[in-house]
Amino acid sequence: MASITLQWPDGTVLPAIGQGTWKMGEDPSQRKAEIAALQHGLDRGLTLIDTAEMYGEGGAEEVVGAALEGRRDEAFIVSKVYPHNASRKEMIKACDRSLRRLNIDAIDCYLLHWGSSTPIDEIIEGFMHLQQAGKIKGYGVSNLDDREMEAWWQHDNGALCQTDQVLYHLGSRGVEYRLLPLLRERRLPMMAYCPLAQGGRLRQHLMSSPAVVDVAQRHGVTPQQILLAWVIREQHGQRSVIAIPKAVHPDHIDDNVAALDITLPPEDTALLDQAWPAPARRQPLDVE
């Protein structure tokens, strides 16, 4: 089992770093490598695999399904439904399509991918129907801010929501002001997508930041590993964040696994806080 773990609301113990699949299933020439990468991650204990019907328009789910052949019991599968499929009737159809692509009987946690025009009551009703039918084991949301979560929890069975998956990394800390504390109060994990930033200038800026480089050198690891260790760090006496970086190269997967052994002492987090400060006020939810 991975060194740093946390407990999902259903009691499942999961590594604090999982496997993301965004942009998988888009290039047929990469399919073999993508399947092998997910299987290598499972071999190394990265049991949570996150996907969505949106990724490659189902292609990523097919890659996950191929990687899970003969190994379903080793994995905790998270997938997401498009907001325009969030009505009860369309959600059932969308979930059935995802299950076929994944080639599994049930999704461990099924998320609303982002906010929908469908009333919350109807969305939750769809989730509950799927759960009662044994097609999902639990449900959650993605890209909802603190006010949207507080509204969600006011509805019947809204408190059964298991997670909120949002963008979170050292250069994007807005969720720390209100959303993450709210989830922590309810003992709910937050899933962090793009924990290394999405790429481009910001990612390079983070990787080359003197503070990140300094901390990495002190630990004898890469800047990427420090960024992952920072995302999953203990906050206020609790670990409540699961990072889901995407990796296709085995070496990168091994680096992600090794990041589970990194514990950042207060002097390291203070240095990183100084370079990339925590929010002093509420901020709009970042999505890119």
Image: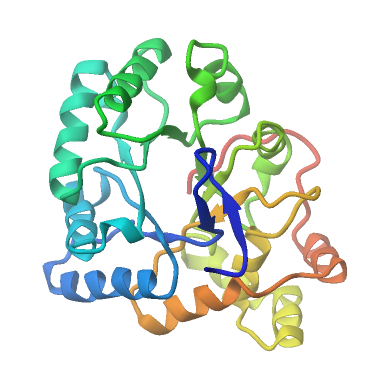
Q: Is residue 120 left or right of residue 282?
A: left
214, above or below 204, in the image:
below
Q: Position of residue 200 (x, y in %)?
A: 47, 66
Identify the residue at image location x=50%, y=19%.
158
76, above or below 40, in the image:
above
Identify the residue at image location x=37%, y=22%.
116
Nearer the observer, 211 or 30: 30
Q: Quadrant of residue 280?
A: top right
Note whether residue 110 is visible: yes
Note whether residue 117 is visible: no
Q: Position of residue 232 (x, y in %)?
A: 64, 59
Identify the residue at image location x=19%, y=41%.
98
Q: Is residue 96 left or right of residue 207?
A: left
188, above or below 88, in the image:
below
Q: Quadrant of residue 146?
A: top right
Q: Position of residue 235 (x, y in %)?
A: 76, 51
Q: Position of residue 155 (x, y in %)?
A: 51, 11
Q: Is residue 30 left or right of residue 86?
A: left
Q: Is residue 247 left or right of residue 184?
A: left
Identify the residue at image location x=78%, y=64%.
275
Nearer the observer, 102 or 178: 102
